[in-house]
Amino acid sequence: MVTTEGDRIRWVELPGQDPARVYVHGLGATSPAYFAETAAHPLLTGRRSLLVDLLGHGISDRPTHFDYSLEAHADALAEALTAAGATGAELIAHSMGGSVAVVLAARHPHLVSRLVLIDANLDPMTPSPSAGGSSGIAAYFEEEFLAGGWQEVRDRVGPHWWSTMRLTGREALHRSAVHLVRGSVPTMRELLLDLSIPRTYLLPEADGPLPGADALTAAGVDVVPVPDCGHNIMLDNPEAFARATAAALTDPHRV
């Protein structure tokens, strides 16, 4: 249970040694669907692995009273990891999940020993009514989204993303998008720069240089382009993702 009302975060667990590895999905996703193949890759097996669904998503509860801010998501995830005995975990986190993971590491540092961020949101964005992702969802008022805006988003994002997005509570989807676009204070980028744990940022090679990469590198963040993939790196090129993630988690110079 991660809220005072008794709401539960759930996960799929793969057995192995501690410290745990925790996989965290993005907006409108679910960790088992996005990470099962790569979490079972020979380069990444052998460690206890939790494929966690954030509150409002996948197999976790979908409370309508929860505000779904990045901080609230991070605190709820902290409750879940504490209950699971997963302190000092290595977090592998995609997109919005990466934003949540950065906030978690800043607010609950004893829970996180390493971060692997997968094309994560680091900066606030501007809502855009024509977009299909978080900026498009955030362009609606909540009442508009619940009344039918979600159907327009469904049609824009297409069947692949909708196959997991449809499992997300509609209030959870809208509020998570609004808060993701708004970002954290300090921003996720500023929090990431200030962390002292090993940090790696994976991005699609085709997207070109990551904005602000020089400052990230100077602060000790490894910025790693991954070839032949789009935003969903672990799905588009699972072999390259597994190699890059395994390297980030086993670098003997990053302790």
Image: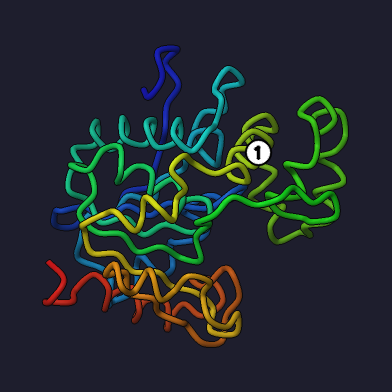
Which residue: 24% across, 30% down? 83
Kindly indicate the quadrant of the structure image that contains residue 146: top right
At which x and y percent is residue 195? 27, 54
At which x and y percent is residue 139? 79, 42
* Amino acid type at image mark 1: Val
Residue 168 shows up from this direction: yes
Which residue: 58% across, 17% down? 65
Tag 1: Cα neighbours inside 10 Å, few (<14), some, or many (≥20)?
many
Please indicate whether residue 143 sits to the left or right of residue 81 in the image. Answer: right
At which x and y percent is residue 231? 59, 69
Which residue: 31% across, 35% down? 78
Residue 14 shows up from this direction: no
Please indicate whether residue 185 sits to the left or right of residue 206 in the image. Answer: left
* 174 and 243: which is toward the camera: 174
| SS at mark 1 in the image | helix
Residue occupied by mark 1? 178
